[in-house]
Image (tube, rainbow, N blue to C red):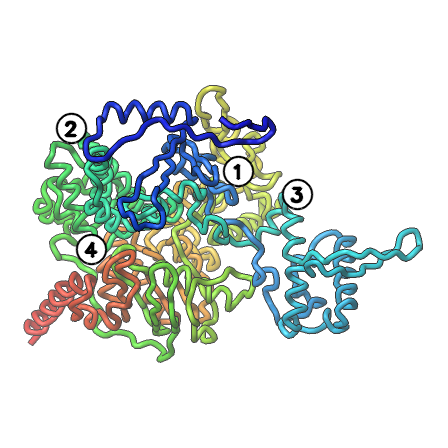
Amino acid sequence: IPVLAKNKRHTIEAVVDRLVTGNIDRVRLSDSVEIALKYGGGIMVVLRENPDPAAAVRWEEEHISEHLACVDCGISYGELAPRNFSFNSPFGACRRCNGLGALQVMVPELVVPDPELSIRKGAIPGWRRGPRRLLLYYNHLLRCLAEHYDCPDMLTTPFGKLSEKIRHVILYGSGDEVVKFDYYLRGRRHELRKPFEGVLANLERRLTETESDTVRGRLREYMRPMRCPECQGARLNPVSLAVTVGGLSIDRFNSLSIDKALEFIRTLQLGEEQTQIAAEIRKEIESRLRFLVDVGLPYLTLERQSGTLSGGEMQRIRLATQLGCGLVGVLYILDEPSIGLHQRDNDRLLDTLTNLRDIGNTVIVVEHDLDTIRRADHVIDIGPGAGVHGGEVVAAGTPEEVMNQAQSLTGAFLSGRREIAIPSRRCRGTGEWLEIVGAAEHNLKNIDVKIPLGTLCCVTGVSGSGKSTLINEILCRAVERHFNPAAGVPGRCAAVKGMEQLGKMIVIDQSPIGRTPRSNPVTYTDAFGAIRNLFAALPEAKIRGYKPGRFSFNIKGGRCEECQGDGIKKIEMQFLPDVYVTCSACNGKRFNQETLSVYYKKKNIADVLDMTVNQAVGFFDAHPPIYRKLKTLQEVGLGYIHLGQAATTLSGGEAQRVKLARELAKIPRGHTLYILDEPTTGLHSADIEQLLEVLMRLRDKENTVLVIEHNLDVIKVADYLIDLGPEGGDGGGRVVARGTPEEVAACPDSYTGHYLAPLLSTAKAQAAGKSCRGK
């Protein structure tokens, strides 16, 4: 052993054993390896003699370590655990974005929404709001910047016409280049030399430093999510992403659609030992993925965020969870599972529900879909009308027995005694088109779509084919940006043409009309303002000096102060859920006694709010401003709801129709684009018939009604169809067919056309029969 310097790190190699290949004693080999790892601190070296005597290297050296570390560079990793592959755990999450996959950044297009304006005219709105002292400071910075770069017209020239260098400096800063800023302190001029930080960096810094929620909310308007530059949206750290199975890291596997993930698991090739280890795991994964496919969700990717799922998709995911349990003797209750489903996917769902029944479960479904009702074993029809006109069992029994009940409205549509008629001619529109060129957002395959103006146009296709992406994320945002340059950036497309022919756009979705019980149908449609004006004009109110605000439950003076106009009081329970009780002072009427003593036609303001729309239409027939707004609520099929019914108790379909009623009540101007996303959700066939009459009225006033829809009753009466597909997810995103319903029904590649063709042929045969009888 040589003399060793104690201040230096030495590598000492000791020979533990010599072995000859061909007849190795495995016990001896095991003992030798154990000794080598013990004295080598978990590291050993294997020397293999090269059998080729002419080789340049006689001995080949291989380092083997029992540590999860590289023997050359020393980088080590801990033992892998499930938490290493979770972006919700600090052990797996990306350090830069904390597992979110995106960072909120200032977007130049939002910070400078209108490049046609100069800085002095307000090109940078984020630097024109705030305390006067701060605004003066920003203006002074920009003047100094203009002087430094010898650009005297920088503040008065439209921002888009400034040189690229000046625009870059204003937005992103001067980098390392020092700019001279002068200032006055106590009457003396001083100079400060420092780099200019840029508007974007300044706004981001203010966002982190401010303690004002108002300022923070205002600054966030200029921000949009950007893919994390470190993990590229994978949400995991590099160590977790370096682990692969079958050549795929966990983020690449999660980016697969469910059907492709299922195919990957089924065809995964593993070694003999790995196959034994992964057998049960593969079985569980395959089972869960197969159930998701069975309920019609093969197009979803595993990484899809739950907030982007529709209500129907969420319901089917929960259903797939129950299918995976394999329970028997369970009562399943589903509320409109067909929401958001194409007819093809609906058939798959019905097969799944039938399978649940067949293995020994009971399935109760609340549904309007006629195909679902026909597949049922027992039907309970509630009615005969809605609201106060319903609540009775009209018919019960098999679908055939319900069809034979004359008083059953559902039975009438099931049997064909009543149906939504196909129009005798299709409206051709104004002859102008709204065109989307090169749509490539999400799964759209660089498609061109033309929408005829002045028509009722339906966008159809199987679930996940790209309908919402095309209309909501590209068209809606592009038109919003056309009318408001500060609006959000549309999805990827080359251009949207023809927007100059639109007067305005109205999007009528199923989001709530209000998030508190104080919002209700009459406040949302502005009918309550006219009702309050009417009560304030009554002689009794004038004598007492009451103004319209006296009859509002949101304003002090007329409301009950005990419950502050809510009509209910919340009792907080320390260890139990809060309890709500009717206010004892006003008995739930929301107003004080003085306000309730003013009557119109023997009804006070609380009585009016408790009326249904059907009752109120006749009650206010002599007051056009009120009557017109209430009449539109009745026309869209909401005659049963109460005027003061809390917005939080309305379904998505009801909220959508309240929004539609508000637009119908306005004075028509024409050239308006109405966009509705599945307006038939939660509607009976009779309600759909009523809704279509309203949509046709909008179309006949030279408006364009664009509907995303699966319901065949709506599709068959449309003037023009745009069918996307043919499948969902990666298999979709293409225009399969376009034209009238008859033209789409003739397309062999269209799933929509496949289900539409029998309806059109039946209607044609019935029309021919009527014609013959007439002759």
Q: Farthest bottom residue? A: 431
Sequence-earlier tag: 2 or 4: 2
Amino acid carrying label 2: it is: Gly
Dot 1 amino acid type: Leu
Q: Are marks 2 and 1 in contact (CB under 8 Å)?
A: no
Residue picked out by circle 2: 329
Say if residue 605 shows up in the picture: no
Residue 160, given in percent of the width and then of the height, sits at 62, 72
The local secondary structure at tag 1 comes to helix
Residue at the spot 21% in from the left edge and 52% down from the top edge: 345
Name the residue that disc number 4 marks: 343
User: Mark 4 or mark 1, which is nearer the start of the sequence?
Assistant: 4
The residue labelled by disc 3 is 212
Q: In the rendered structure, which amino acid carries the disc numbered 4?
A: Gln
Quadrant housing residue 35:
top left
Q: Nearer the N terminus, badge 2 or badge 1? A: 2
Q: Which residue carries the number 1 mark?
A: 596
